[in-house]
Image (spheres, helix red, strand yellow):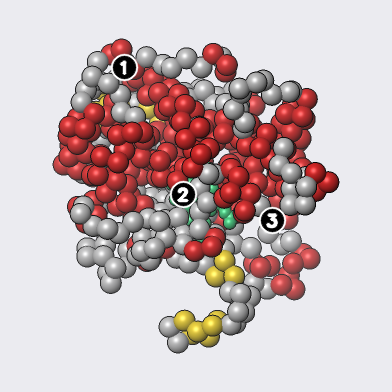
Amino acid sequence: MRKLSTFELLTLKRLEESRNIRDEEFSWLAHGIFEHCKEGNPVNMQTSLSSTSMNVISRLLFKKRYFNTMHSDEESEEFKDLVKKIMKINGVFNISDYVPFLKPFDFQGIRLECNQILSRVNRFFNKIIQEHLKEKMKENESKDFIDVMLSHPGVNGVEDRLDELTIKGVAIDIFVAGTDTIATTVEWALVELIRHPNVLKKVQDELDDVVGQERVVNENDIPQLKYLQAVLKETFRLHPPAPLLMPHESRKACEIGGYHIPAKTPIFVNVWAVHRHPSAYENPFDFNPERFVENPIDVKGIDFQLLPFGSGRRMCPGLNYGLLMVQIELAKLLHSFMWTLPKGQNPQDIDMGEIFGVSIPKKIPLQVVANVRLPLHLYASKKLDAFI
Ligand code: HEM
């Protein structure tokens, strides 16, 4: 499964091919916020960002978008609920993992809930796979990830094609791993920027220098947006979307810091704590992107003091997707809008509480008012004829 994600699906070629999806969805996000905030109403950024991430990933996977950026229908709510439930159950502390003789009893009802979720996931993906098998792809139409997996010859050729269980597993893995991570990071970045107006101004000044105000920002601008990149590194440091990474296991016995770790021990790497450790960072609790300016520390798994994507063999295979998505989405939001809190609220009063699980989203969703900072025609929505 891992090889399939890394070498067939989340490749640089497919990243480039899917640029129009990101372009359209992020334009829709800006358009939706523009429409919503016209009258001065605050927008719930958690809902908007999460819907947008889900649309991007579901279009990559099976060319469908379920979420209208500002509104949702019943089917999309069901799907979103499924993803949320999977995220939640992934993060639950399961006592039977540590006291194996309790396994048969399912005291916490985790197995029961997993089975219920699984049958809903099965129902959903059976339909998608059947639709893909029925519909012949049009010439010149780009392949989605389900197409790629269905046409994959398997390890030993035609007789060994990928089975449906593997396809469903990879699809749900990518969905879960690629949606909340993006939405959570961008929401936390916005929160920190609203709490630090001097940083917000600096990053918007950079956008105006690089992009100007006569066009919208695009992916080619990203390499020049050095301060924006520093802001995101600082956001990843304080709010890593996967604070304990995924569960790992020691392959053989080893010794770390004087502790003996037997083979096959479950390992959780607490990057949240590493990122806030005073031996790694000065004033580690302060949000200070300047620490990453002219600093070679990167998020690519080489610098152990900053590991939001993990490191080594099991590190995030969607790193290039993830990084580009948070960069362009945040750039678009900051370039397009001035951000203020609803009347009567003070940036320093924003609740910084987190929900702790596989990811750590903000406990109370960010509500903000967005005011335009570009010419009005730049907020027009890109056409999504295929989906309307
Ligand atoms: C801000 C964005 C993201 C962050 C911070 C992030 C972080 C991570 C982390 C920490 C892991 C576990 C690594 C480990 O345990 O060592 C992981 C796994 C994974 N990520 Fe990401 N990720 C992001 C976006 C994405 C995206 C956009 C995709 C796909 C489009 C993706 C696909 C995956 C997959 C499939 C795995 C599981 C790999 C496995 O089963 O071994 N991620 N990610």
Q: Distance between the Cα atoms at labels 2 and 1?
A: 30 Å
Image vertical order of residue 11 relative to residue 26, above or below: below
| Residue 54, percent from left and from top | 53, 34
Label 2 residue near ligand 1, CB within 8 Å: yes
**Element under disc 2:** helix
Task: Answer left or right for 29 relative to 97.
Answer: left
Residue depth check, mark 3 versus mark 2: number of the one nearer the observer: 2
Measuring 61% from the left and 74% from the top, which residue is drawn there?
Answer: 251
Q: Quadrant of residue 32?
A: top left
Measuring 26% from the left and 65% from the top, which residue is drawn there?
Answer: 281
What residue sits right under mark 1 in the picture? Answer: 378
Measuring 39% from the left and 63% from the top, which residue is drawn there?
Answer: 302
| Residue 76, percent from left and from top | 60, 28
Image vertical order of residue 374 relative to residue 19, above or below: above
Q: Amino acid at mark 1?
A: Leu
Measuring 37% from the left and 14% from the top, which residue is drawn there?
Answer: 380
